[in-house]
Amino acid sequence: MASGLSGAGLQRGFGAEIRDAVTTRAFVLVLGVLLLQFGFIVSYVGALHHPYPHRASIAVVAPPQVSGQLVSRLNALPKQVLDARALPDEATARQQILDQKIYTALVFNAAGKHDTLLVANAAGPALATAVEKIITAAEQQQGRSFSTEDLVPLAAGDAEGLSSFYLAVGLCVGGYLVASILGISAGSRPANRKRAVIRLAVLALYSVAAGIGGALIVGPILNALPGSVLGLWGMGALVVFAVGAITMALECLFDVVGIGLAVLLFVVLGNPSAGGVFPPPLMPPFWRAIGPWLPNGAGTSIARSIAYFDGTAITKPLLVLTAWVVVGVLVSLIATGRRPRGGRPITQPDPA
């Protein structure tokens, strides 16, 4: 009997064994992973391989008879590397840098040939360095020199200015991983709306814990970021919940494929465009355009603002995160209400 079964197994052929081992669905998913891998390489290399400034904002403080000419000269530099604008005085320029309305400012010395370049390394040391090189060449052509003053230096534990970025990336990872785990463990699509609400409640509790943990790690534990621990906690919880809710929504709509779409959105596109390694003016147009509208970039901006700029310019990124939360929750609830299938079946009690 056993030999007969073995013979039947051999007669099936190698092709049949392949079809059993790798189903059509598995093949499609593997192909999707391959495309995600290629997308990862393209996105990261494309965003970070050749940074150069594009319309980096710089204020010019100079007497009226000099200001217009100096602004025009800076704006006429090749590749539109600078976006120069005139300001009436140095105090205004300093305040606009602190308010994150501009990146740098050139203060012209009418009494001599040595000017001052105001920067904020906390907004991105790579950009400050790039602007210094540009201004060095421009000043040398006019027989002038300058010195640099850093208005917002980086903390000792944040030497490269990347702690805000890494905090946001870690929070995003937690958000889509916990949503993916909840989906894989009990069916990507919740069986009904009540279960979707329960998953969102679990995600909310996780977000609170993840937010306080991240704030404590980058703050008191590692001394990487200054600023309000409470503010970083709130930002962290919002980022985690936003990413997790969107991941759940994608799972409700596309089943396990939704996890891959979340990876595409938050890892392949979100991380390189977040403005961590390089601020937006140093990135190519596509990544510069999408960065502020994704949770990774919004979280990085809020964390940096809380840590170094007293919370200025956080209204827009807060609204971005809130919008992601609202969309994620509504889509999850609507999708499960209209298509209550695909989740773990509801167990009926034993009549006995």
Image (cartoon, rainbow, N blue to C red):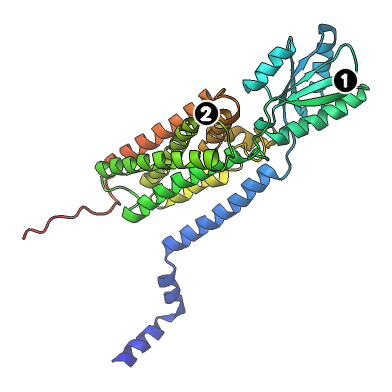
Quarter occupied by residue 156? top right
Q: Judge the density around disc 2: few (<14), some (14-19), many (≥20) Cα neighbours within 10 Å.
A: many
Q: Position of residue 211 (x, y in %)?
A: 45, 39
Closer-to-camera residue (15/345): 345
Identity of the amino acid at label 1?
His
Task: Please give left or right for residue 299 compared with residue 238 in the image.
Answer: right
Task: Tell me, for residue 114, which label it has, or none.
Answer: 1
Front of the two marks 1 and 2: 1
- Tell me the element at label 2: helix
Q: Is residue 233 above or below residue 15?
A: above
Quarter occupied by residue 242? top left
Residue labelled with disc 2: 317
Task: Please give left or right for residue 191 compared with residue 205 in the image.
Answer: left
Q: Residue furthest right?
A: 143
Quarter occupied by residue 243? top left
Q: Residue furthest top?
A: 64
Residue at image point 64% right, 21% down: 98
* Pointer 1 or 2: first along the chain: 1
Task: Please give left or right for residue 310 compared with residue 350 in the image.
Answer: right
Q: Is residue 37 above or below residue 223?
A: below
Closer-to-camera residue (157/286): 157
In space, the residues marked 1 and 2 are separated at their CA atoms by: 38 Å
Q: Is residue 304 above or below residue 171?
A: above
